[in-house]
Image (cartoon, grey):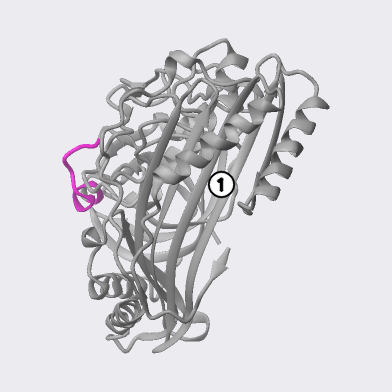
Amino acid sequence: MQTNPLARMTAAPDLDTSLLAERARDVLKRCQARGADAVEIGVSEEYGLNVGVRLGDVETLEHSSDRGLSITVYFGQRKGSASTADFDPSSIEASIEQACAIARYTEEDPFAGLADPQRMATEFPDLDLWHPQPLDVDHAIASALACEAAGREDKRITNVDGTNWSSGGSAFAYANSHGFVGVERGTSHTISCSLIAGKGDAMQRDYWYDNARNAGDISSPEAIGHRAAERTLARLNPRPMKTGRYPVLYSAELARSLVGHFLSAVAGSSQYRRASFLLDACGKAVFPDWLSMTERPHLPRGHRSANFDAEGVGTVDRPLVVDGHLARYVLGSYSARKLGLESTGNAGGMHNLELTCGDASQAELIRQMGSGLLLTELMGQGVNGITGDYSRGAAGFWVENGEIAYPVDGITVAGNLRDIFVAIEAIGADIDPRSHIRTGSILVGAMTVAAD
């Protein structure tokens, strides 16, 4: 990666995808000339500006640019891969030779190979992902400082962890020996603010952020700072609570982590390795019968929108959960072959995923819960993907008679993910748009909550 901390303002690089595609085709032909039976090439380029401020001073100012070339060749069922960030002809030639050498000495894998040529993408609608803005250092610093200043307006905010502003873009070209060539490019813009309230043992910290493909879709710096302060101040003076089993409401920004555990369990690699708490669950009930999930890879400005997956397979809207039942696994071509199934266009992972969400706001879900726990922070990695056992440190708010009563921290929420999924009672309308997993707050009927 190259960095340049000096330029005050530059135009955002265009990231010409036609040049990336041309390079991908050229390298592919050179691999075929070496005798490879099948080839796939990826060429990427990205840029960014990142500014970090703290207590009124600029701590980070970095222009970055990066590029990469990945080469995968197949000699029969033997696979070799190599990559380089150096586009000098001699470096590319060395990488081609390295990939071919690896393939020649690798054992055959009957499941290796390109995706089915009939599945290659043929339609490429504009997904509205490319919204560059000038890389204006002065504007970036002013925005970050305005965000921090808004967050520090209340004198109970005693310190700042940091405020960051970033803007960048990336482009990618993929080509394979089926004759497929596809290109994509997109931008991302983010502002975040992390604050501290109180002193000594009474200190609490929290944060807020926003991100989007188009900078115009992001909340104002002042709004982000105010939200960070509001969240931080709300955590002051936590009280103890009793260990027990209670309803638990995952705020929308945490709810997607539950869905993430589910996606890991139904990934093809977890299934063929027999390392999933949802082993052989396709067609079976996993969630309540009112809950469905649908993959939406073509959402305009979506965080994971794409016309094709990492193997060139065309993407389409596709159900994942229907009436609580798992409709399919999440598969690329390799895992599909291992399982005797077909690719679902998910080489590289899940695209945008929409859950069935109700009409209730978070406040209405809190009233529906009556008494229980509203979670706003999760800590630790206490999740066993094989058994589904779940135990994570947490913080949030105790709810009494449908109203937030007081903050709590130093607690642990626990259960088994199979039981947690079945116990979901409602999903709110407060969908968090900052992730490819589009869900509102999730209300779980009962979980074990252990207090210190």
Residue 219 location (% of width, % of height)? 23, 65
Q: Using the image as rendered, state which of residue 308 and residue 220 is in the foreground.
A: 308
Q: Using the image as rendered, state which of residue 8 and residue 152 is in the foreground.
A: 8
Q: Quadrant of the C terminus?
A: bottom right
Does residue 365 show up magenta in the picture? yes
341 displayed left or right of 426: right
Quarter location, residue 306: top left
Q: Residue at x 44, y 34 (%)?
A: 350
450 displayed left or right of 30: left
- What amino acid type should be assigned to the residue bearing mark 1? Ser
Q: Is 189 located above or below residue 295 in the figure?
A: below
Question: Could you say whether the residue bearing mark 1 is in a helix, strand or loop?
Answer: strand
186 displayed left or right of 429: right
Q: Using the image as rendered, state which of residue 111 and residue 451 is in the foreground.
A: 111
Does residue 418 show up magenta in the picture? no
Quarter location, residue 211: bottom left
Q: Is 350 located above or below residue 19 in the figure?
A: above
Quarter location, residue 50: bottom left
Q: Which residues are magenta?
A: 357-366
Q: Using the image as rendered, state which of residue 225 and residue 126 is in the foreground.
A: 126
Q: Which residue is mark 1?
A: 391
Residue 54 in view, yes or no: yes
Residue 111 location (% of width, % of height)? 65, 16
Residue 362 location (% of width, % of height)? 23, 51
Residue 195 location (% of width, % of height)? 40, 77
Q: Residue at x 70, y 38 (%)?
A: 96
The extreme top residue here reads: 340
Q: Quadrant of the N terminus?
A: bottom right
The crowding category of the residue bearing disc 1, from other C-alpha atoms within 10 Å (few below 14, some 14 to 19, many at least 20), is: many
Residue 251 in view, yes or no: no
339 displayed left or right of 62: right
Q: Is 64 located above or below residue 42 in the figure?
A: below
